[in-house]
Amino acid sequence: MNETSTNKRPLILKAENVHKSYRMGATRVKVLKGANLSVREGEFVAVIGASGSGKSTFLHILGALDRPNEGDVSFDGHYFSRMGARELNHFRNEMVGFVFQFYHLLDELNVLENVYLPAMVSCGVAGWLGTRGAAKARARELLETMGLQDRIRHKPYQLSGGERQRVAIGRALMNKPRLLLADEPTGNLDSATGNGILEVFEQLNRAGQTIVMVTHDERVAHRAGRVITLADGRVKS
Amino acid sequence: MYKLTLIIRYLVKRRITHFAVLTVALCVFIVVVVMTVMSGLVGEFKQKNHAFVGDCVVGTKSLVGFPYYEEFMQTLERTEGVEAVSAVVKNYALMRREGDARNRGVEIIGLDPVKHGQTTNFGQTLYHQAGDVTKAFVPAYEPNAVGCVLGIDLALWRNAQSQYTYDAQPAEIGLILTCFPLNARGAPAGAGSVPVSTKRFQYNDHSHSGIAGIDGSTVYIPLEWAQSLCMAGVLKRVTALHVKFCPAVSLEQGCIRVRTLWDQFRQSKQGASNAGLLDTVTVETWKEYRRAVIAPMEKEEAMLSVMFGFVGITTVFIVFVVFYMIVSHKTKDIGVLKSVGASSQSVMVLFSGFAAAVGVLASCTGVAAALLFLSNINRIENWLFERFGFQLWDRTIYAIGEIPHHAEFSVLAVIVLCAIVACQIGALVPAYCAARLRPVETLHGSRT
């Protein structure tokens, strides 16, 4: 994507001076030491870094799955620190979609149900009765896009790694989120399958989807529009 | 909506859930069966004692008895709310069959069969004279002799399954009763000579009260003969007045009224001959009068309830362990749910609802199995007896025809409710832990 045109787009995500530390036994490990990041709408950003550099922690904070010890993150100008639990739940349900390294599909649900899970979470029994048809149609459409239209009744354990990851991407996109966060999405796949997943990401990004992807693999990272490096708890470039 | 879907899937797909359902169902099954049988036994026993005694007893524990009872009977009969009154002499005697030198100790109850039949279920306990209680002491073979009624276990033989061999007519048996009469001061009446009274009675019928202790040791004779054999002195005495209240009168209200009347009566007799004997008289409800036999059974029932309390605690613990394991295995699911916007409360509701579903399913299964078992319990017992000679309740000890098997809806409802609550309590901590789980702890690095 053209850099000049990207720069004109509005800022969607901003992490400012994010600090995060964990207690490991008696010692406190500082993972993030003032990380900053700005992501514009429609960008495909790859965060690269060595193992243990805090990439996943940073991604979780960007997706409001975790809170920083210091600093703040804003989405569309709204700071997470000022949001209540209900607003953050709503943010995770509507605004952001997660893709994890190990797919994390629910074993009890079939492929179709796994994809429309976010739609089920967003409404109660009565609401679901009204939106069920549309949600199922959207899930089917996503699975068709992923080439999984023949697998909708299958259970996750009946799928290959690549297929599971495509189901996970479908789930992440179910509620049409403005931001897609991917944590080592190809880390558990062979290179050919991983390449297929990256092609899906590229396709989504071309369609305007904002993506932030964490990876330790430079080849994977360079498929993104912008690559930033996380080292010593800070964003280097 | 996802909660309902996941609850159903967890119920159907998770094998550990099946074990939890099975365990809770088994607990419910045991509680329903034992409670039904036990409360049936206790209820039946109480009902039989109530029917045997009437509603209220004005009586003395002393074998000497108390005088002026006829006056008080008249007072009671005139009292509103009193349906019937029966005077009774209760004492002990030796009994032997004519032509047999062996004596056995028995309890004798002297009564007026008509009045006693109106006050208690005496008329219905008879076999040959059930239709006409006036003939209870009128022998079929010797109209001039005095008849008596024997407790059924004194008269008939019964097998291990509590079945008696009945005769079309009462057997022609003469019975000799030897009593030890006491005078109004409580001393043996004929001191210095032979202090006994002996009388021949003709066996005329048997009484089946359903109370083993009564049916195995009691001989019923006419009131006047009991007085003559057991009580010496000018003033006629009895040991108890049995009172029956009208259906509209509550037991407590009726007894309070009788107690008041008795106190007034006793006051009015102060200074009369042998008035001191009236001081030994108490007014008791049938429950108080028979508490010596009812209390142990009630205690057993209470102890059983305590034991079932432990069963309940065990259920809670089992559910806790199962749910703790489920939550431990489902941390990834919890992380995923939170990542797609599920709140902590909603995760807690998911696991609490899951526990409730386990409770409902398990208690329904347990109740259904228990009802099925109870409806066949007598058949099963008969089969065990015929096949292995094993009897659950020895009928020579437990005066029951068949094992009680009618479960009360209210009892079932309470048990089901307790099972669901136990499941909820058991799942409370695991559900709370699930709700508090931080998604980053479960999602990062855990494999599918």
Image (tube, coloured by chain):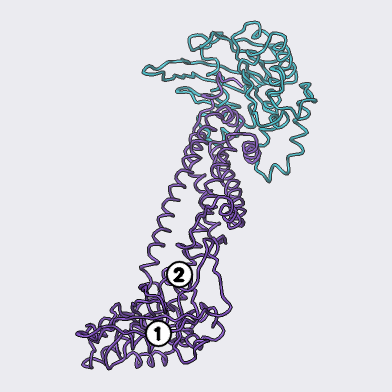
Give the chain ID for the purple colour.
B
Tell me the residue at 67%/17% (across/down).
Answer: A43
Give the quarter of the image for residue B1. top right
Q: Amino acid at mark 2?
A: Ile
Q: Residues within 10 Å of mark 2 (few under 14, many from 20)?
A: many
Q: Amino acid at mark 1?
A: Arg
Q: Secondary structure at mark 1?
A: strand
Location of residue B244 in the rendering, given as x and y in whole percent from the top left corner: 44, 82
Q: Is residue B234 visible?
A: yes
Q: CA distance from mark 1 to mark 2?
A: 26 Å
Residue that numbered label 1 is attached to: B200
Tell me the residue at 65%/37% (across/down).
Answer: B12
Q: Secondary structure at mark 2?
A: loop
Q: Residue furthest top?
A: A219
Location of residue A89 in the rendering, given as x and y in whole percent from the top left corner: 58, 33
Give the quarter of the image for residue B129. bottom right
